[in-house]
Image (tube, rainbow, N blue to C red):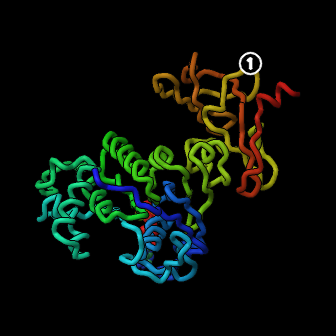
Amino acid sequence: MTYTTPPTTPGVRLAGLTKILGGRTIVDGLSLAIEPGELVSLLGPSGCGKTTTLRMIAGFLSPDDGRVEMAGRDVTALGPEKRPSAMVFQNYALWPHMTVAKNVAYPLRVARRPRREIAERVADALELVGLSHHADSRPARISGGEQQRASLARALVQRPKLLLLDEPLSNLDAKLRVRVREEIRDIQQRLGITTVLVTHDQEEAMAVSDRVAVMNAGRIEQISAPADLYRAPATEFVAGFIGASNRIDSLGLGSGEDGVHYVVRPEDIALAEDGIRACVTRVLPHGHFAEVALDARGRELRAYLSGSVPAVGDEVCVRFDRALRYVDGALDGAVDLVSERIAG
Ligand SMILES: Nc1ncnc2c1ncn2[C@@H]1O[C@H](COP(=O)(O)OP(=O)(O)OP(=O)(O)O)[C@@H](O)[C@H]1O
Ligand SMILES: [Mg+2]
């Protein structure tokens, strides 16, 4: 394979990036620094401004305020073709009348590269995504995952120093999503290419990213390594968005202090000799654990229990082993209740 690692894969810096569309602030003073060779996901609910942000990084949309820098250079005023990036779009839009190879060759033909170079680079890109055997097929004759990989090849053939992917797996079924996302991560690691991946699928973001930026209403709520995002969500929004959680007003469940909330993960709820009395309302077996819904004085709690699982209608006592404390929506600390109990 002659595809070589981009010699100087750039870092990316967004500073105060802002976009107003239809009178609404869609991206709101967004700042973010991505290291060379890093894969960062933009994760957030539909409509939070992910695609708009990616289009500004690619140069398809110019910001109303703020700056885009690549490798320390201000590229805000440059068009997409002048930037070292290539984008895979949310709908992967292959030309139906062209073969896979012609589709992949397209950006190089537009750039008027010599015929021989095009042939070599297309062959390399197809090999990289495992599609050499489909070079002469038309898009309609290959599977969704193969079409997705063809559009990835069409981006990689440009030898971008920065890869921008907008929901590249959105049209695949669950199994294929997992496989293609692993392939994308593998290619990204092999090439050492700086990558920004947009997704609204948290499992996907957590699985492939070095860091995940959680977006809400045009802003970044938190950027962290996947594990930190789950263990220490910086805001109540992130706590609610990443994984399952129970939000309560006080650890005794009753009314608490103003502006204070607690978030308890389902796996941090356990059955106990004494504690909070609750009634089991639903049990969903998941194999090695059960998802149990509890009614605790009118509040619903969701717990993941393993070992001996109670039945619907049972009266039980539960304790919280760990809780996250939020004051006015911001993380104030994790309360480790097991060690607190032992210490006290
Ligand atoms: N040209 C436009 N004019 C007016 N509003 C727009 C325009 N483009 C996007 N928007 C609005 O900006 C908001 C953010 O859009 P964007 O496509 O960035 O969201 P997203 O986070 O990518 O969502 P999804 O996960 O659904 O793809 C949406 O409410 C959308 O309706
Ligand atoms: Mg989008």
Determine whether, in the image, residue 46 is placed left or right of residue 243: left
Instruction: Please state which of residues 269 and 164 is positioned toward the viewer in this rendering.
Output: 164
What x and y, as percent, mark residue 218? 55, 68
Quadrant that contains the C terminus: top right
Q: Secondary structure at mark 1?
A: strand
Picture quarter containing residue 327?
bottom right
Q: Residues within 10 Å of mark 1 (few under 14, many from 20)?
A: few
**Ligand 1 image position (quadrant):** bottom left
Residue behind mark 1: 273
Q: Give the quarter of the image for residue 155.
A: bottom left
Q: Nearer the viewer, residue 44 or 176?
A: 176
Query: Whole-percent x and y of residue 74?
Result: 53, 78
| Residue 131: image location, x then y, percent | 21, 49
The amino acid on which the numbered mark 1 sits, given as a three-letter code, is Glu
**Residue at horizontal 19%, vertical 71%?**
114
Vertical placement of 344 versus 31: above or below?
A: above
Where does residue 191 sit, x and y in percent of width and height? 40, 53
Is residue 172 toward the left or the right of residue 17 in the image? left
Residue at the spot x=21%, y=59% of the render? Answer: 120
Residue at 49% across / 56% down in the picture?
37
